[in-house]
Image: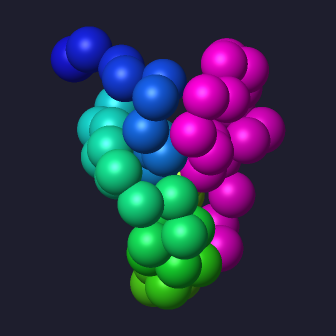
């Protein structure tokens, strides 16, 4: 899957990635994930790689 760094992203531990044009919406979705879902958030234009310790159970 191609990653668009010009959008906010939610990375899931299983390998899935969701892109969002609205960064505030993406952050709200990430915070609202149910317990047991391991995901990492990257803001718009954030080029840092996602490491295993970035996947938190929000």
Q: Which residues are magenta?
A: 40-58
Residue 52 locus on image (x, y percent): 68, 31
Q: Nearer the viewer, residue 41 or 52?
A: 41
- Residue visible at 46% across and 29% down in the picture: 6
Work out whether residue 22 or residue 37 is closer to the camera in this orientation and state it: 22
- Where 32 falls versus 23 (above or below)? below
Q: Position of residue 57 (x, y in %)?
A: 64, 67
Q: Is residue 34 left or right of residue 58?
A: left
Q: How is the image coloured?
A: rainbow
The quadrant of the rendering that contains the C terminus is bottom right
Q: Residue at x 73, y 41 (%)?
A: 54
Whether residue 51 appears in this view of the structure is yes
Left or right of 2 on screen, residue 47: right
Of the 4 image quadrants, the one containing the N terminus is: top left
Residue 56 lies, with reference to residue 4, above or below; the image says below
Would residue 37 be seen by someone viewing this image from the given angle? no
Q: Nearer the viewer, residue 45 or 36?
A: 45
Residue at 36%, 20% (x, y): give it: 3
Residue drawn at 54 percent across, 70 percent down: 24
* Snapshot quadrant of residue 31: bottom right
In the image, farthest residue toward the left: 1
């Amino acid at each position: 899957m191609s990653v668009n760094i010009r959008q906010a992203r939610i990375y899931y531990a299983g390998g899935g990635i969701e892109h969002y044009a609205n960064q505030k919406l993406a952050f709200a979705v990430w915070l609202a994930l149910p317990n047991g879902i391991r995901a990492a958030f990257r803001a718009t234009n954030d080029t840092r790689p996602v490491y295993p310790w970035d996947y938190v159970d929000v």
